[in-house]
Image (tube, rainbow, N blue to C red):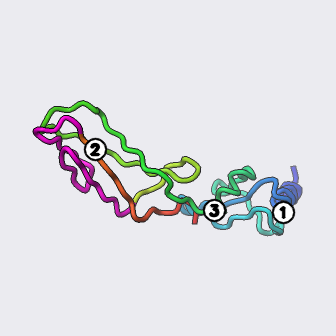
Amino acid sequence: MNDEIIKETIVRGVSEGLFGYASEQIPGKFDPFFFNESISSADIEFSDDVFIVTSEEAKRMQVPSVLTSIELSVDSTNIKPGEKIQVVAIGRDQYGQMISLDDVEWEAKGGSVDEYGNFIAGVKETEAFITVKSKVSRQQYP
């Protein structure tokens, strides 16, 4: 098949907002990124770093990810007084995708927790609560 025909098809699809065209030279960084705009066939290249993405995904790529929730994951919810467990905080964006957390603040009632999520159950408590806050999160799409 002729490369120019494929390029013109991509140009038409991108211009009409049917799909997006993106190049990922650095993981997580898409440059160039085209969607629903006029481009030229000279802007199109074929390589392992170039992707055609659905219009839905292209729309998501235009809006930076925003932290909307933090999930806590633990191996066990039943521990004895004085025992230690690792708690993992997982950030989620508005699309439910994982997002990196920065400046994480940990708080615990019924025990203690350090900045790495290591929780030590209190000696007398029968219940414990862990709260996690993140002031800043990295954007998934620049």
Front in this rendered view, residue 98 or 104: 104
Residue matched to label 3: 63
Residue matched to label 2: 129
Q: Residue 36's x, y, as percent?
A: 79, 63
Q: Residue 135's x, y, as percent?
A: 40, 64
Q: How many tags in the picture?
A: 3
Q: Residues within 10 Å of mark 1 (few under 14, many from 20)?
A: some
Residue matched to label 1: 15
Which portion, as a residue range, is magenta? 102-127
**In the image, what residue occupies the spot 41% across and 45% down?**
71
Judge whether residue 112 is colored magenta: yes
Front in this rendered view, residue 129 or 6: 129
Earlier in the chain: of badge 3 and badge 1, it is 1
Q: Secondary structure at mark 1?
A: helix
Q: Residues within 10 Å of mark 2 (few under 14, many from 20)?
A: few
At label 2, the amino acid type is Phe
Do tag 1 and tag 2 residues touch (Cβ < 8 Å)? no
Q: Residue 125's x, y, as percent?
A: 16, 38
Front in this rendered view, residue 4 or 89: 89
Earlier in the chain: of badge 3 and badge 2, it is 3
Q: Secondary structure at mark 2?
A: strand
The answer to whether residue 95 is left or right of residue 128 is right
Q: Residue 29's x, y, as percent?
A: 57, 63
